[in-house]
Image (cartoon, grey):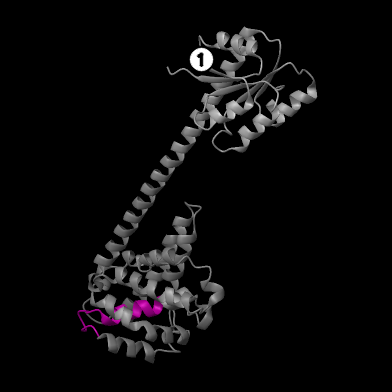
Amino acid sequence: MERKTIFIVDDDLTNLTVGANMLSDSFSVFTFNSGRLLLKKLERYTPDLILLDVEMPEMDGYEVIRQIKNKKESSQIPVIFVTAKDDCASELEGLSLGAIDYIKKPFSPPLLLKRIEVHLLVEAQKAELQNYNDNLQEMVDVKTKAVVELQGAILNTMTKLVDRRDDITGGHIERTQRYMYILLQAIAQRGLFYEESVSWDVPLAVQSTQLHDIGKIAIKDCILLKPGKLTEDEFESIKTHTLIGEDFILDIEKETSEHKFLDYSKVFISTHHEKWDGSGYPRGLKGEEIPVLGRAMAIVDVYDALISERPYKKGFSHREAVRIITDGRGTHFDPSIVDLFTSISDQFCQIAAR
């Protein structure tokens, strides 16, 4: 085991000799007959503990400990005052300046040795605890990263399951994420809907769009994969995917205290089929009753549906899709978001082309 190092500071040569002889069997001991010499040594070396006299010429012990504690490099070194001053005020001043103990002369050598050992043990335990805390934070960070990655992988797998069940959509979920990021960034940059958009966590909101069609898991294959126009009853069944998805998120909320991601998901799931004129589903919300995120998702979702090929139709061109969405301005879609969409639609086209 490495020997601990102790610095003894005293202007009395006899005290230095006695202290060094008493401690040298257990510690590596260095002696200094002035505070100035100690401070100079501390510029190059850090001991495990300092025994410091109070009454010294030129610079007393109180001034020495002030300078020790005022420097970052030496501030954590434990200091014990060893002095003939035995009044309570002197002891209180020494402890107030940062000393860990105050031992009066004359002292019992075995008692001094024991108190030094106790303080060194305390310092070692403090260092061990600090090291543990530092490593614990690192372990927590690593574990958190692993959990987030696992959650992301599970979420990605779930959404791909929906995407592949409804195989006519191809990479619908991935593309809508990219479209949504562009659209939300543009909304924020141009100051639209400021009171609402200023609080958005855009990356988190975009990630949550993956779940907007999660309710389709519960739709029968014969309806979901039907290669033709749906009957009225079949369409009513399809419409329930919004409420099924919303219930799915509500069930998850019961099991967790972190709801921000889920709150975004609920908005996208439950409102991306609502229409500006109130003719959408599932609740027939109208105009500003529909959250901005839902109104944005409606455009993103329809744009991708229009350009995608289906068994009963070919995919529209980008230009045709933009025209159809523009025609829906003020009926299907929020006019302000349509205007923004048309100004940045070339970025949608680039994503679709990939």
Q: Report whether 292 appears left or right of 161.
A: right
User: Which residue shows up at 35% across the image and 56% down it?
Assistant: 152
> Where is residue 178 shown, x and y percent of the image?
34, 71
The correct choice, above or below, for 290 with respect to 158 in the image is: below
> Where is residue 221 shown, x and y percent of the image?
25, 68
User: Which residue shows up at 45% across the image and 61% down it?
Assistant: 261
The correct choice, above or below, for 290 with respect to 47 in the image is: below
- Residue extent of the magenta highlight: 297-316
Residue type (three-letter) at the residue carrying disc 1: Phe
- The stretch drawn in magenta includes residue 299: yes
Tell me the quarter of the image containing the N terminus.
top left
Q: On the image, numbered disc 1 is attached to which residue? A: 27
User: Which residue shows up at 38% across the image and 49% down it?
Assistant: 145
Toward the viewer: 279 or 58? 58
- The stretch drawn in magenta includes residue 325: no
The correct choice, above or below, for 67 with respect to 202 in the image is: above
